[in-house]
Amino acid sequence: MLAIDNTIFVCIDMQVNLVKAMFDRERLIANTRKLIAGFNVLNIPILWTEQNPERLGATLPEIAEVMPASACPVSKMSFSCCGSEDFVHALKESRRSDVLLAGIETHICVLQTAMELMDLGFRVQAAADCVCSRTLGNNAVGIERMRSMGVQITSVETALFELLRTASSPQFRAIAKIIK
């Protein structure tokens, strides 16, 4: 199970020129905003990346505006986030063992990141309602490949309530409000 003390959230390549090509972008944006808001309430660290930002643009404003002020995007050229030394360094500095993934594209950058994180010894989950590809088929392939490798597939609500554990948590009301 995800735990507040051991989890870090990685938001992959939610950039202007990529998001507009996704098959279900409205759902992707809305759910990713909820997840970021929930992680902010729970004070869980967030890493976010931008793939070749000079060509693919900056992070979508709707996503960037809910990121914690202390976070800034890690630029990368590799499909896997782990191809960036800055990313791997920040991840190791967090001293977290569990990584929750969201972003695009499911069958490329999210999948390759999941594979390499597992090779590095991290426990990995992916929020199925916060990952997307240009086509439904490629999204399904990415999710199925991750599942077959041992990545736990989750959702926004499942992850946030798993982190809370109980309705008596001081953050419960704030999380419930985000979900609604």
Image (cartoon, grey):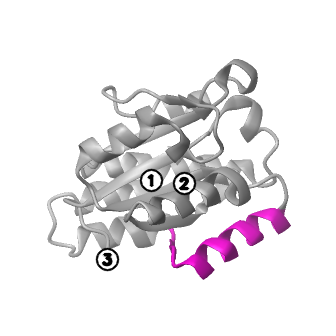
Picture quadrant where residue 54 is located: top right
For marks 1 and 2 on the same chain, the one whose residue lies earlier in the sequence: 1
Q: Do the residues under discs 1 and 2 have CB atoms within 8 angstroms?
A: yes
Q: Label 1 crowding class (10 Å Cα cut-off): few <14, some 14-19, many 20+?
A: many
> Nearer the viewer's eye, disc 1 or disc 2?
2
For marks 3 and 1 on the same chain, the one whose residue lies earlier in the sequence: 3
Q: Residue at x 25, y 52 (%)?
A: 42
Q: Up-down: is 26 above or below 50?
A: below
Residue at the spot of label 3: 1
Most common secondary structure along the magenta stretch: helix
Is 148 within the magenta? yes
Residue 103 location (% of width, % of height): 60, 50
Q: Residue at x 58, y 27 (%)?
A: 61
Residue 40 location (% of width, % of height): 31, 44
Magenta stretch bounds: 136-155
> Nearer the viewer's eye, disc 3 or disc 1?
3
Amino acid of disc 1: Leu
Residue at the spot of label 1: 35
How far apart are the two marked residues, 1 and 2, measured between alpha carbons?
Answer: 9 Å
- Mark 1 secondary-structure assignment: helix
Residue at the spot of label 2: 102
Residue 135 location (% of width, % of height): 85, 58
Could you tell me if residue 41 is visible in this image?
A: yes
**Which corner quadrant holds the C terminus?**
bottom left
How far apart are the two marked residues, 3 and 2, measured between alpha carbons?
Answer: 17 Å
Q: Residue at x 42, y 26 (%)?
A: 72
- Mark 3 secondary-structure assignment: loop
How far apart are the two marked residues, 3 and 1, measured between alpha carbons?
Answer: 17 Å
